[in-house]
Image (spheres, grey):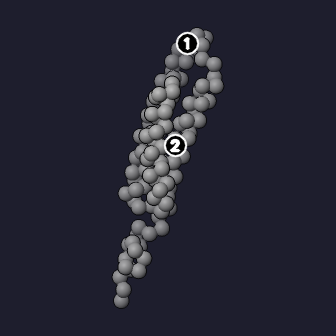
Amino acid sequence: MHDRRSLFGRAPATRGKRPLCAAGSVLLPPLVAGTWLLAEAHPWNELTGYLGLLLAGLLYVGTLLASVTGFALGVIAVIRQEQFRYVAILGLVLNVAVPIWIMYHH
């Protein structure tokens, strides 16, 4: 009798896992970038006052939380050996690149 690991290359428990964590890791950076682009479309001026400060603070905290969450989801996807591993790696790269882009352009 053959070992199932040798027939399929991986243990049956790790084969065919849906890339849920990888997809979450890739979807969070465009959401963050889109939020920043929408915030730029709003005319910030002295009339916004403290509300503008509150919204800016929420943007920065939300960006930090989304990036850390997306990076963690990417790491979990790589550890779980989900299908389409390149999606998880792309998510890792995007979750580092988008906050750096925001930091240098705002």
- For label 2, the residue is 28
Q: Picture quarter containing residue 41?
A: top right
What residue occupies the far top of the structure in this picture? Answer: 46
- Under mark 1, the amino acid is Gly
Disc 2 versus disc 1: nearer the observer? 2
Q: Is residue 2 visible?
A: yes
Q: x and y percent of residue 26 in the render?
A: 51, 48
Q: Is residue 43 above or below residue 85?
A: above
Drawn side of residue 60 relative to residue 41, left or right: left
The residue sitting at 39% across, 51% down in the picture is 75
- For label 1, the residue is 49
Q: x and y percent of residue 23 in the render?
A: 52, 52
Q: Is residue 70 visible?
A: no
The residue sitting at 40% across, 74% down in the picture is 9
Q: Nearer the viewer, residue 53 or 88?
A: 88
- SS for dot 1: helix
Q: x and y percent of residue 55 in the render?
A: 53, 23
